[in-house]
Amino acid sequence: MWLREIQLGRAVQKLCIDGFAQEAQMLARAMIGCALDMMLICEKDADRRALLYALFQMKVRGERSKALVRYGHLSKERAAELEQREQEIGRQSLAAPAAAGTRPASRLGKVRSTWSGLSP
């Protein structure tokens, strides 16, 4: 998440320097959302909330992959290959917390479109 924040910041800076400050507004909004996510994770029960976030991102990635296939931007075969690779990386990443007995936190609200369950 921190790396994403840095990448977005660099993009905003570059756009502003090049005279496209107004166009950078959506990226700045994404930076705010990312910062709020990090604050919510760190606020309380960070390990469990981070797991909840990671699991939600895995789900989102799968949905985005399906959309790319549906609109012809990615072949079904390539999507399956990438998904299998990402699933393995996800399993490996989640193995250590699972072995330590750390379980994902419960969602904080009922909104299904966000990792926390809170409205965006």
Image (tube, grey):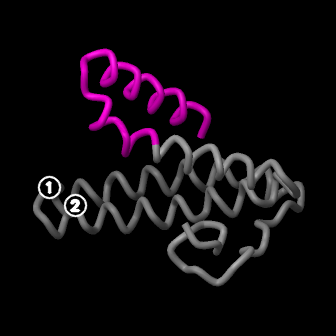
Q: Nearer the viewer, residue 28 or 94?
A: 28
Q: Quadrant of the C terminus?
A: bottom right
Task: Work out which residue is located at the far top of the displayed protein and give it.
Answer: 17
Which residue is located at x 82 percent, y 52 percent?
A: 47
Q: Quadrant of residue 81?
A: bottom left
Span highlighted in magenta in the image: 1-28
9 is within the stretch colored magenta: yes
Where disc 1 sits, the SS reads loop
Residue 68 in the image: state x and y as whole percent: 22, 61
Which residue is located at x 58 percent, y 72 percent?
A: 119
Q: Which residue is mark 2?
A: 68
Q: Nearer the viewer, residue 80 or 115?
A: 115
Callout 1 touching callout 2 (CB < 8 Å): yes
Task: Work out which residue is located at the far left of the displayed protein and give it.
Answer: 72
Residue 75 in the image: state x and y as whole percent: 16, 58
Using the image, determine if residue 99 lies above or below residue 35: below
Which residue is located at x 87 percent, y 57 percent?
A: 45
Q: Quadrant of residue 80?
A: bottom left
Amino acid marked by disc 1: His
- Say left or right for 24 vs 32: left
Compute the Cα span from label 1 to label 2.
5 Å
- Say left or right for 85 vs 117: left
103 is within the stretch colored magenta: no
Magenta residues, dominant SS class: helix
Using the image, determine if residue 4 lies above or below residue 94: above
Using the image, determine if residue 5 lies above or below residue 89: above
Indicate which disc, 1 or 2, sits on the residue closer to the N terminus: 2
Q: Which residue is mark 1?
A: 73
Residue 72 in the image: state x and y as whole percent: 10, 61
